[in-house]
Amino acid sequence: MKKTIGILGGMGPEATAHFLELIIKNTKASKDQEHIPVIVHNNPKIPARSDAILANGESPLPLLLEGVRTLWGAGADFIAMPCVTAHYYWNDIMAREKVSFLNLLDETLLYAVKVLPEEKRVGLIASTGTVKSRLFHDVFEKEGIEIITPDEKEQEQVMEAIFGEEGIKAGYTTGQARETIYRVAASLIQKGAKAVIAGCTEVPLVLKDDDIPVALIDPLQVLAEVSILKAGYELKEKTEGTE
Amino acid sequence: MKKTIGILGGMGPEATAHFLELIIKNTKASKDQEHIPVIVHNNPKIPARSDAILANGESPLPLLLEGVRTLWGAGADFIAMPCVTAHYYWNDIMAREKVSFLNLLDETLLYAVKVLPEEKRVGLIASTGTVKSRLFHDVFEKEGIEIITPDEKEQEQVMEAIFGEEGIKAGYTTGQARETIYRVAASLIQKGAKAVIAGCTEVPLVLKDDDIPVALIDPLQVLAEVSILKAGYELKEKTEGTE
């Protein structure tokens, strides 16, 4: 059974467009008609996830639920959400809407288990909301995988690189923002990380697998591949690593 | 009044993802919440447009209408369709559905009138469906703009570059496909074109404004900018030309 993918997006819009491209590029197809039907709800008005989790800001849950209902009404057979931090609300969504909804964290864990060596320690580059909410920690530690994170100062720099005036969300994917992400990745590897999770959907826009000596785990790439298979299509080619 | 854009896409999916990116990149915004809500109906199953127009193939109209109704039901305030050839069916759609739907051909004409010098002659690189159906000819000739097209052999090569096994739709945006498009653009300019229309949405994926000595008119870029303004948002910066 071939399925239609629903993308609950807009968090941010760049990551959503990138995720749609990942689905298209990784699908085995030689003409339009062999590609997967996808409905995208790109709603950038969804309140900021980190603010809601860390600073008691406006909850994104109502608009997330609205997006889920819109996608379902438009004919999506299952949903994928290309934003890590928003997965803080995944259980709340599932408690309220009877839909099929991939969990990016669970899928990333399954992938990490496959690529990690004996020493099960991964570095995490993510928004402070994701780090402090321990989204990855809780899922990974159950499987005996230790998560190591940047120190406080590095974490501030990561946030600046993602959300700053000249950050990735503002469209700057070269220069200072990129350098910061590289430096923090190197620091995590020095602390013993055997793989690095690009734990915010903006990170893989500037950090690629070839840039670091350990595996880069890109949850967006993982989610795209899982989505393609779940929709009943084949992957374009056997991919090594995450790019 | 801020509006939600509906994208009737999938023709092809790469052009749809590219168009979503053009909207995001050209919107003046410094954080997610300042971006435009967009609903994308990426349906690659819509029958091939050129086949339907030239070879009496299956009509894409039923699935186009279904896509329009899906976007409208999901909350789109107006629709944009990032596929030139499919505009052959624009009048048929408007006769059946009471929706607000930008016409890429009309918007491209308004743009061409602005950028052309006294000598109103433009070259057209497009699918054979678009060329033979005279979609651009009919709209542009009313305004006294002459359209010149590749000769028969060049036109076959353009089709191969777009639809061939190693063509742009199959994901090949460098190499032979790109060279063909460059060569045909140069040939049109030699015949007197004072601007070149990237008349199939795959063409601007390989041909850029800086690549040729006359203006490249990219209908996708034009449509993205018009869509942003119509949605009630500002353009990121004053753009020169079409890139």
Image: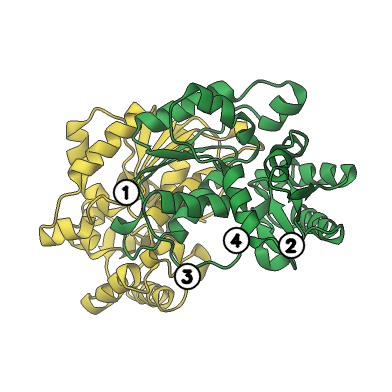
Chain colours: A green, B yellow
Amino acid carrying label 2: it is Glu
Give a yes or no on whether discs 3 and 4 share a subunit. Answer: no
Q: Which residue does the numbered mark 2 point to in the structure image?
A: A118
Query: Residue B79 appears at what percent x and percent y?
Result: 35, 36
Query: Residue B22 appears at what percent x and percent y?
Result: 50, 49
User: Which is more N-terminal, label 1 or label 2?
Assistant: 1
Q: Quadrant of residue B227?
A: top left
Query: Residue A223 appears at what percent x and percent y?
Result: 53, 49
Q: Write down the chain letter for disc 2.
A: A
Quote the CA–CA distance across marks 2 and 4: 19 Å
Local SS, label 2? loop
Viewer-proximal residue, B183 or A159? A159
Q: Which residue does the numbered mark 3 point to in the structure image?
A: B212
Which residue is rendered at x = 50% and y = 21% of the image?
A: A96
Viewer-proximal residue, B174 or B171? B171
Q: Write down the chain letter for disc 4.
A: A
Give a yes or no on whether discs 3 and 2 share a subunit. Answer: no
